[in-house]
Amino acid sequence: MDLGLPSVVRDPALPARVRIHEVGARDGLQNESALVPVEVKAEFIARLAAAGLRTIEATSFVHPKWVPQLADAEELLPRLTELRGQYPGLRLPVLVPNERGLERALAHGADEVAVFASATETFAQRNLNRSMAEALEMFRPVVGRATEHGLTVRGYLSMCFGDPWEGPVAPEQVVEAGLRLIELGCAELSLGDTIGVATPGQVAALLEAFTRSGVPVARLAVHFHDTYGQALSNTLTALRHGVTVVDSSAGGLGGCPYAKSATGNLATEDLVWMLHGLGIETGVDLAALVGTSAWLARQLGRPSPSRAVQALAGPTGSPSAAN
């Protein structure tokens, strides 16, 4: 970074600005084998905000039996209250699986929520213990009530490109499930490559299928895993098709506890390096972000898998300048 890297070459065909939807504190930490103290989670989110990220998914109000790593959601949210005043425009969405989860989220001051659906039947059964249709009906009152309370609702759609039990997933199947979420009232739809098998051609085909169905690209986000090293190339393809919201996880944390072939999310640092090299604004301070992920790696007791963190902070993820 002292050499002025990355070199910036602007591509006028790409968006001028991208909003990063940071999922490390929720999607990343939920996959940890050991419980992370709530104090560490709160500081992690505060450091992410200080690095310039303005959409940070904080936690999930799922039953502790299913995701014990996030059982402290009710204790975490109050610790984040002051951050909204400190960083104007900061969004701290939370995941809610059902009406009970929404009630808990509302009681603790959540002002933005997300629901999580599947594009395939098998994953719906394994992840939600119900069919795709039953899951969508479960979300109907959740989205309706959240909207009535003035909350913005995001819809996650997993297994959009491939399923470990069903194989390749047809774009039309994904579009049908996505339309249902939008019809329920989801303002934004995040298309997830849960097991990281997508390639740029598939990404282009899916986005074009949504466009043909009448869904504006402005309502779509992308969420790639880097299982086969394709996350950045898939992201670039999405940008070329007009997508301006990209999910990523600081330090490349995460996976999916219900799909064992899923490895880590696209690392936010790797994404920011590419976007900044393309002259795309993110509002993120890369050095501060690398320092944050290096700090968290030390809390977790292992190096960060992010290639940018390794390059800028050293293989141990412990930069001398980042504390």
Image (tube, rainbow, N blue to C red):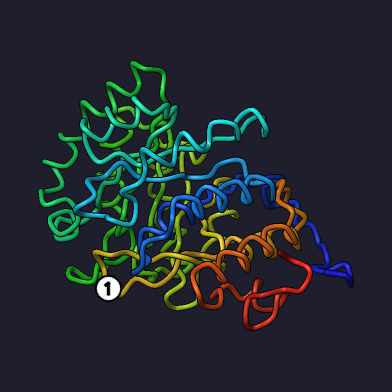
Residue 10's image quarter?
A: bottom right
Amino acid tagged 1: Lys
Is residue 5 found left or right of 54 in the rendered image?
Answer: right
For the point 75% across and 57% down, the residue is 11
Question: Which residue is located at x 11 percent, y 52 percent?
Answer: 129
Furthest toward the bottom, the residue is 315
Tell me if 35 is positioned left or right of 245 in this view: left
Residue under label 1, please give it.
260
Say which of 239 and 288 sits in front: 288
Give the residue furthest to the right. 3
Q: Which corner quadrant holds the C terminus? A: bottom right
Q: Position of residue 208 (x, y in %)?
A: 44, 50
On screen, residue 307 above or below 100: below
Q: Residue 28 falls in which quadrant of the image?
A: bottom left
Foreground pick, 306 / 33? 33
Q: Is residue 213 visible?
A: no
Q: Position of residue 135 (x, y in %)?
A: 16, 42
Report x, y in % for residue 82: 59, 31
Which one is in front, 239 or 104? 104
Q: Please, what secondary structure does the residue beneath circle 1 have?
A: loop
Instruction: Quarter of the image for the N terminus: give it.
Output: bottom right
Query: What percent of the width, then of the height, locates residue 96?
Result: 30, 39
User: Image check: 321 left or right of 264?
Assistant: right
Residue drawn 14% across the image and 60% down it: 122
Of residues 278 and 240, the one nearer the viewer is 278
Residue drawn at x 27%, y 27% as measured from the top left: 103
Res. 309 in view: yes
Q: Neighbour class for label 1 at 10 Å: few (<14), some, many (≥20)?
A: few
